[in-house]
Amino acid sequence: MRCIYKDIFLILSTAFIIAGCSFQNISDGSTLFQEKDTNETQTYQEEAVRPSNIYDSEDTAVVVKKDYEAGTVQFQNIRTSRRYTLNYSGTTRLYNRHGEDISMSQLEEGSVVTARFYRENKALSYVKVISDGIYYNKLDDYSIDLEKGTLSTGGNIYNISGHIVVISDGKEADLMDVNQVDVLSVWGFDNMIYGINVERGHGYLRLQNETYFVDGWVEVGDRIMRKITEDMLLVVPEGTFDVTVNSKGSQAVQRITFARNEEMAWDLGSVEITVVQKGSIIFTVSPATAKAAVAIDGSAVNISKPVELDYGLHRMRVTAEGYDTISQYIRVAEPTAGIDIELQKSEEESLQEESSEEKDTSLVQNDNTTTSPSGTKTQTSSQKSDDDDEKESTEEESSEEKESSSDVDDDDVVSSDSGYKVYIDAPEGVEVYLNGNYIGITPTSFAKNAGNYVVTLRKEGCQTRSYTLQIDSEKKNVNYSFTELSELD
């Protein structure tokens, strides 16, 4: 009898030892057994009475969708992009990236996590947001390059997974649905972005009875600054902002709350307009030896004396031979103000100076030629003809002018000499706005120029949608067909 008890004791002891074992964890769903977390000090006896600690699989995945009613969570494996759904319960342990307990409502869709589960009954045992990956919270200073598939912020460039999970307002979205004004949470691993959650999205602003303000400016907080055109529809950030319109020195201000994916109209026909005011601006150019030419709103001004300008926004362009052209906006809002203009030497000028210094320390023939091994005379690479210099300078200024006008005047983006077009084919019968400017009813098109554009689709009774397009420079037409607009409730 004593031997029987002894055998039973040995069997139980062996079972506890096996239960305390752990195996190497990898992210491709390898079979595992009992968890043994080095950060926890639970005894084997405590582990034995907690079935949530039993799991046979572990995965590194993106949280795609939570269903509170069904008690499930959908995941997407970051390596294979395979999706699967697991059941959670009150015994499922949830941790944030710092290892702190969280609730299921605090587990963000789009986050990259370590998930442990029991495969047979699809029971979710453990979820922890990875702590050694990429994470940005409430990111508003970024740029997304759809063509290269990258996200840039703070000097860092990350690749975007071809199967990235984008969540907006609790629903899956496409990367084209993300607008530059959106505020994001971003998760990734090994320099690859796998999940994005749009924390604050965008709505739309329509100006009504705007005739007086056409060719003036509209500002939405400090995020949006655009030239006013007829029948425009602006994509604006979600939230409450002071919206300002100004023209000819007059302005009107209204505080407006924009909801995600909803359109707000501001009737300018009855707004109170302030009287026209002017400010005196003193321009100072550095270096003082540079012969700078300054143009305000396309007209040359004499900066040797104070320049009087209407209150509001103005476009300033500064050019000087041998220096980079400056093109930017200035705001006049005080009776007197000073603007310091600091010119930077152009790259071509710097190269010429370096070349000149090199010539001073080397042997150069009087006819500005060198002799090649074959005995023929060739022009040195540092000695370009005046015609070449003038041609390059003209091309540089033309290119910079085109870039500046594209950034400034939105109506310029629909003009092109290429002859190629971007066609918006579907859905049919909807209004199309290009960077806020109305261009027609689908099917419609606009001239093709390489760059980023926001196309907004609108139809009465339907939810307005906008898409960020990155147009390439290939010499061919491009066609886009979007999904039907959802009807409003």
Image (cartoon, helix red, strand yellow):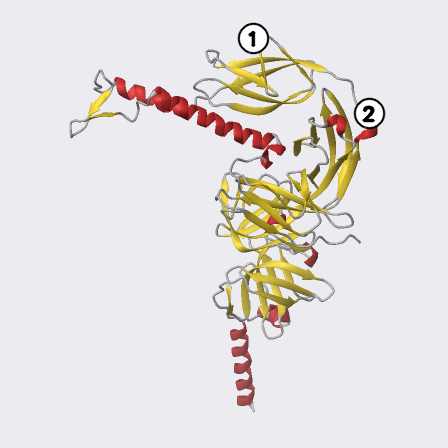
Is residue 394 among the parts visible in the rendering? yes
Q: Which residue lies most toward the right here?
A: 270
Q: Could you tell whether 260 is left or right of 449 in the image?
A: right
265 over 117 or under it: above or below: above
Q: Nearer the viewer, residue 373 or 180?
A: 373
Query: Number of numbered discs present?
Result: 2
Residue closer to the observer: 435 or 52: 435
Which residue position holds label 2? Answer: 272
Q: CA distance from mark 2 to mark 1?
A: 37 Å
Q: Does residue 36 appear anywhere in the picture?
A: no
Q: Position of residue 283 (x, y in %)?
A: 57, 13
Contact check, label 2 and label 1, Cβ < 8 Å? no
**Vertical comparison of 133 with 126: above or below:** above
Q: Position of residue 284 (x, y in %)?
A: 55, 13
Secondary structure, mark 2, is: loop
Q: Residue furthest front?
A: 419
Q: Upstream in the sequence, badge 2 or badge 1? A: 2
Disc 2 packing (10 Å; few <14; some 14–19; many ≥20): few
Q: Amino acid at mark 1?
A: Ser
Q: Height in image: 485 above or below 454?
A: below
Residue at (61, 40) in percent of width and height: 140
Q: Which residue is mark 1?
A: 304
Q: Quadrant of residue 438?
A: top right
Residue 364 in picture, x, y percent from top left: 22, 19
What amino acid is at disc 2? Glu
* Residue 410 x/y as whole percent: 62, 33
* Between 433 and 188, the one nearer to me in the picture: 433
Q: Quadrant of the C terminus?
A: bottom right
Q: Residue at x 71, y 43 (%)?
A: 203
Toward the bottom, the furthest residue is 1
125 or 198, nearer to the observer: 198
Q: Which mark is residue 2?
A: none
